[in-house]
């Protein structure tokens, strides 16, 4: 299979390149280094020193003999993206090329406008490039569980049949998100669902919960292959931040009451989910939605787990409930259905004590690179 | 009241300026002439010669002594918009500053990207300018009935209470539109609804059906005040196009079977609806949605009405069913609820024979300006 991975330098993008390459697929990797540049601009670089994308592909080739073709460029430039599609005719495109941070999107108008424009124009361009360059190509788009928000009804897997005044129809599950970033992910789904109806695209939308972890079987081969890993307020996800805070002797920053509940998954399971989706693609004319999580936790539950293992390892972990800078419900109903990816063959890596210990061990090796100033910036939703 | 009207040069924008000005309100009018320039580029100019916005404001002042302040500029430029908000502190902003054509948005990637970017960045900028410049300002955004598409259930007024597995919640009514343009109107609602929840904006979303007509009490005062009127495939709405086709002796272009049913309203009623919304604003933290139509017709019903009156006036009207260039259901359920604007005081102008005759009469005066090449361009949705 030929796989085009957009946003290939990122936390998920690079391990995905390796995962497909390792399994014998031809990988074309594209990135514009937005994430690296923004992290530098905001003084919140990756915990792990990571060579640039070209260098990482060279290291991978040295180690395995497998080639990943790299293009450095911005896929909001439609001519660039179309030329890549026409040259490579990918079977699958994995779309990670979005600004992925909720807090970044809430800093101010400039960052909001960038997020909106980047995330929607990349998605639009993919729809057009598939239509004009390779109509059979399967689009795998990363969505987020955050699109659903915290409704007072069960969260179904993407779609909801509604009966109203004796008549029925089926719609995308209602979505109302908690940040501008998450809102752009609702909007990119609107876009792809529109063009799927018009042009018979084949699309899989992976509604992913926050991902944690910093290793996969491939990135474990060599330190230089490790993912671009964030633990800061802007680009880090909650469990990743807690582990690094614990290692740094910094109190875990719980926003508000900490009863906010979300669905989580291990980085290794993201790899599986994307791969299973690619090898068992959606049909032409189908927007297939999967809820991509393996278990749900409240923020307090995560903090307690990190404290338990951290204390056992001698870190003396403190938990600090701070005023919530976000606008979100701190107590809410949360019941998510997620069976689709299991049916495709997902074998979850649950958040065991062993996994947490391993996470602490690797993080500990980079303790001297932790920038405590990055843990909390107080980016306010108001 | 101080009213800021964005997109003030357009078919709806200019009559809205006059409507508020006539009633003693202070009007600030902004436009970037996108619509005029695009109409020139695509050789589909207004039926009626219209002076530019600055000139029209001067004419209005000469005739009535009432001043409309004009800014020519692009509100995707946030600094410009914020400076206008800070200078004028409007009580109400009426947001017409979007690319308003479904066929234009389907021409190709360039036009789609422009539509997406323009329509969402203008909306984002308004949310930010209200927050930073004048948090009490009431935002009136034009939506479109086309956002709902043609669901198999009744179309409620913006919101739907859903009962699912014994639990209840209320959501924006599910929306799945028939063009990229209409999809951007779903997305701009997503944006405003998000920021309303975050920042307690006050927003009215007017889900408007296709508008017809070319006169209001104010534009009737002088020919030079008439609206910028389109009858072409790109920017014209269906009834406006039919009348001009009938006057030109060109067969009415019915797309496909013609059973597509939509809600319509008279240009005079758009004025009422916007005015009633402005003078009875939404509450802080409320996204208020009204379905803005006064009656529903199928395309065939409209064609027959135009033929009946046209024939009576000696035009010998032909109807031509052509292959539908759009992707849309030609037979579908359609039952819309719309009581909110009536409750605010709307007195509808229904589509009577008299109104159609008057429409023919005015159109006839511009017969020599009709460009028949503009009636059909065959812009395909596929």
Image (tube, coloured by chain):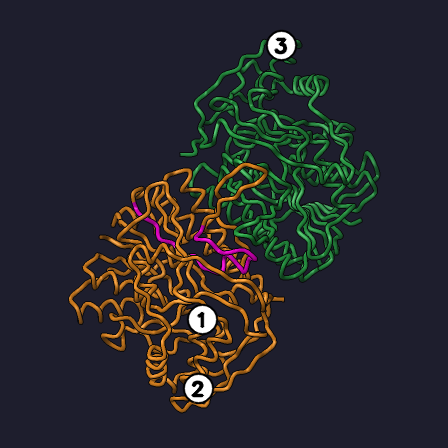
Chain colours: A orange, B green
Residue drawn at x 58%, y 45% is B173
Nearer the camera: disc 3 or disc 2: 2
Q: Magenta span covers which residues?
A: A137-158
Give residue A248's mark.
2
Instruction: Look at mark 1 in the image and give the residue it sits on.
Output: A237
- Looking at the picture, tell me which residue is in the foreground, A382 or A147: A147
Asked if A108 appears above or below B332 in the picture, the reply is: below
- Looking at the picture, tell me which residue is in the foreground, A148 or B204: A148
Q: Marks 2 and 1, how far apart in space?
A: 17 Å
Give residue B174's mark.
none
Within 10 Å of the Cα at label 3, are there few (<14), some (14-19), or many (20+) other Cα atoms?
Answer: some
Within 10 Å of the Cα at label 2, are there few (<14), some (14-19), or many (20+) other Cα atoms?
Answer: some
Secondary structure, mark 3, is helix
Is residue A57 left or right of A159 when viewed as pictured? Answer: left
Percent across and percent down for residue A254 are 53, 77
Percent across and percent down for residue A268 are 31, 68
Secondary structure, mark 1, is loop
Q: Which chain carries label 1?
A: A
Q: Is A288 inside the magenta-drawn segment?
A: no
Instruction: Look at mark 3 in the image and give the residue it sits on.
Output: B311
Q: Is A138 inside the magenta-drawn segment?
A: yes
Is residue B216 left or right of A289 when viewed as pictured? Answer: right
Corner quadrant of residue A222 = bottom left
Asked if B202 appears above or below B244 in the picture, the reply is: below
Percent across and percent down for residue B351 are 69, 23
- Looking at the picture, tell me which residue is in the foreground, A63 or A236: A236
Q: Do labels 3 and 2 share a chain?
A: no
**Quadrant of the rendering where the C terminus of chain A is positioned:** bottom right
Asked if A248 appears above or below A149 in the picture, the reply is: below
């Amino acid at each position: 299979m030929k796989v085009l991975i957009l946003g290939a330098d990122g936390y998920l993008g690079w391990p995905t390149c390796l995962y497909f390459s390792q399994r014998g697929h031809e990988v074309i990797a594209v990135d514009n280094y937005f994430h690296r540049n923004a992290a530098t601009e905001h003084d919140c670089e990756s915990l792990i020193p990571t060579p640039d994308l070209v260098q990482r592909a060279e290291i991978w080739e040295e180690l395995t003999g497998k080639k990943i073709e790299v293009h450095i460029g911005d896929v909001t430039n439609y001519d660039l993206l179309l030329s890549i599609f026409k040259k490579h005719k990918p079977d699958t495109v994995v779309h990670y090329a979005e600004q992925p941070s909720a807090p970044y999107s809430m800093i101010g108008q400039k960052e909001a406008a960038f997020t909106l424009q980047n995330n929607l124009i990349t998605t639009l361009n993919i729809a057009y490039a598939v239509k004009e360059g390779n109509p059979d190509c399967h689009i795998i788009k990363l969505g987020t569980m955050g699109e659903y928000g915290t409704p007072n009804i069960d969260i179904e897997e993407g779609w909801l049949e509604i009966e109203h005044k004796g008549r029925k129809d089926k719609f995308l599950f209602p979505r109302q998100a908690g940040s501008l970033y998450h809102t752009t992910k609702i909007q990119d789904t609107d876009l792809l669902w529109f063009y799927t109806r018009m042009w018979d695209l084949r699309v899989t939308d992976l509604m992913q919960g926050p991902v944690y972890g910093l290793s996969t079987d491939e990135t474990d081969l060599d330190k230089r292959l490790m993912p671009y890993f964030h633990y800061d307020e802007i680009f880090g996800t909650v469990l990743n931040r807690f582990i690094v805070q614990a290692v740094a002797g910094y109190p875990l920053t719980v926003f508000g009451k900490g009863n906010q509940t979300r669905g989580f998954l291990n980085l290794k399971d993201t790899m599986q989910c994307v791969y299973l989706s690619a090898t068992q693609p959606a049909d032409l004319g189908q927007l297939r939605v999967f809820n991509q999580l393996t278990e749900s936790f409240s923020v307090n539950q995560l903090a307690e787990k990190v404290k338990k293992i951290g204390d056992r390892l001698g870190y003396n972990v403190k938990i600090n409930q701070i005023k919530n800078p976000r606008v979100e419900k701190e107590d809410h109903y949360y019941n998510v259905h997620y069976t689709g990816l299991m049916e495709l063959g997902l074998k979850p890596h649950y958040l065991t004590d062993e996994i947490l210990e391993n996470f602490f061990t690797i993080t500990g090796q980079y303790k001297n690179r932790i920038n405590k100033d990055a843990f909390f910036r107080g980016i306010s939703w108001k």
